[in-house]
Amino acid sequence: MRSHIAAALFLAPSLASAAETELSSRIDRVTVFPDGAVVTRLGKANLLQGASQIVLRGLPATIDPSSIRVEGKGDGSFSVGAVDVRITPGDARPVLDTALEEKLKALRDEKEKLAGQVAAIEAKRATIERFAQVGPDKLGPDGKALPVGDWPAVFEAIGTALVKVQDELRGTRNRLADVEGEIASLERARPQAGRPGAPKRDVAIAVEAPQPVAAEFTVTYRVTGANWTPTYEARLTTTGEKPEIALARRAEIRQRSGETWDDVALTLSTTRSAGGTRAPDLTPMQVAFFEPQIVAEARARAQALARKAEAEKAAPTMQRRAAGMAAPAAPAPEDSLAKPIIAADVAEAALEAGAYQANFQVPGRASIPQDGSSKTVTLSQRKTEATLAARTVPEIEQKAYLEAGFTHDEEAPLLAGRVALHRDGTYVGMGQFNLVAPGDKVELGFGADDRIKVSFAPVKRRENDPTWLGQTRTDQREFRTVVKSLHARPVKVAVLQRIPYSESSAITVETITAQTTPPTEKQVGDRRGVASWTFDLAPGTEKEIKLAYRIKWPGDRELSYEEQPLPGK
């Protein structure tokens, strides 16, 4: 007869008096999370008749004792009781990965360098903004007025300088964020500081059998020092009858748990096992009039005295009630409080795929060393039809970029991660995926499109100066963009340009419709002040886009132009 018993974890000091039998085990399965792993060990032992202990020795100190679960089965009946976790001295020193440490040092140096560049660029921007606040009437030689004919050139130079420095600042900040993300990912996989005699953990399992039994045990536990990160490769082919993207989903696995995973069945889960399990509580907020500290303290003392008086008044009543109450019942005997043996739920293997989590069973078996070196496995590969378009932002860069879009139709989401981009067999650079749920549209950039020519130029700028106090000032600007295609087939083009916006009722911004090409979208997504023109461009043809707007504000005030961060950045 075979039996199957699952044991819940609780501590029982009395286990030390039972006979001990070594449990020989091996790691069979590992489920890796972005912030840890769950290890499953299989072991065999010959149980003695009567009560005894099965001891699993030398587990890493990084295990979470509350996560240990034990299941057992054998060729005869037996019961599994308490599980005792002991800390024992160890003699192994964790191995430092010199390659990982060198990479961390290089990344930290780069982070420090980028932080310095950000500070320098911000100082440059502040200098330009201070210069912009000086009126043209003081920019001439010896602090005299600058000739009116030179004012437009000064305004244009300031605007161009601000755009350039802001673009430089954005790029440096993005690279700094990438470096900080890489550092955090590597530090999660670092080993604990090694020292001689690092502790280990032994797991003692209480069993009792009416007769000798050949038993098999399954022990699972969670460890830290392990993680996996998603990586992708997207290969765009434009030379076929229809554009196509081949997308490979991969995972980089690292672990420094203190034990080597040799020839194990590997599962990767998108669940964060160490994260929160519910939304945080929100405490109420009361609004009141501001009171000086001395008033607040006096009020608090008065409230405290009032509570004390009420308590003294109620004391006799409470004493009378207490006298009439029966004595409390005697405590139950200690034996009656003993914890019962509770069977744990049996874990069932299943593939779970949803909008925000999934488990990937890696084909075959794999070995992951404990030195923190990365192991890359392929999770999935697929091909899908792509839609091509060229996107240009001529105010920033007079160049068009090829973009390919597709719909993510797999069951599992695409987690945020870096993607290596290839166009017609040529590597063009690295991109980034944000979280992509099933059914979402994905757009990836595949480098500059040299067969599309873009030109952009300010056509006219007119400002009026107030001649008396309170007169309204205006600033009218006109721009011209020309996009020309040198492709042999029609191509879809999207042009993005910005129009300043204001949240002040005293400042009005109006588009001059008679001198503006109607945009396809007056606002792109949730980006205020960004419009787009989308059109199909035939081979050898060009498209002209005109944009004109006028800003009005009180003549006794000066304007400032501040770039706003993109949503989600």
Image (cartoon, rainbow, N blue to C red):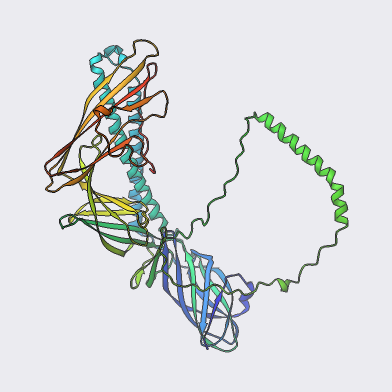
Up-down relation of residue 248 to residue 492 (above or below)? below
> Horizontal placement of 317 versus 162: left or right?
right
Specify whether residue 518 is in view.
yes
What x and y, as percent, mark residue 268?
39, 65
Residue 508, picture quadrant: top left
In the image, what residue occupies the spot 23% across and 17% down? 150
Residue sitting farthest toward the front:
514
In the image, what residue occupies the spot 39% across and 16% down? 556
Residue 386, picture quadrant: bottom left
Q: Quadrant of the C terminus?
A: top left
Foreground pick, 451 / 534: 534
Foreground pick, 512 / 41: 512
In the image, what residue occupies the spot 32% across and 44% down? 175
Residue sitting farthest toward the top:
468
What x and y, as percent, mark residue 33?
42, 62
Specify whether residue 373 is in view.
no
Foreground pick, 442 / 292: 442
What x and y, as percent, mark residue 466?
34, 13
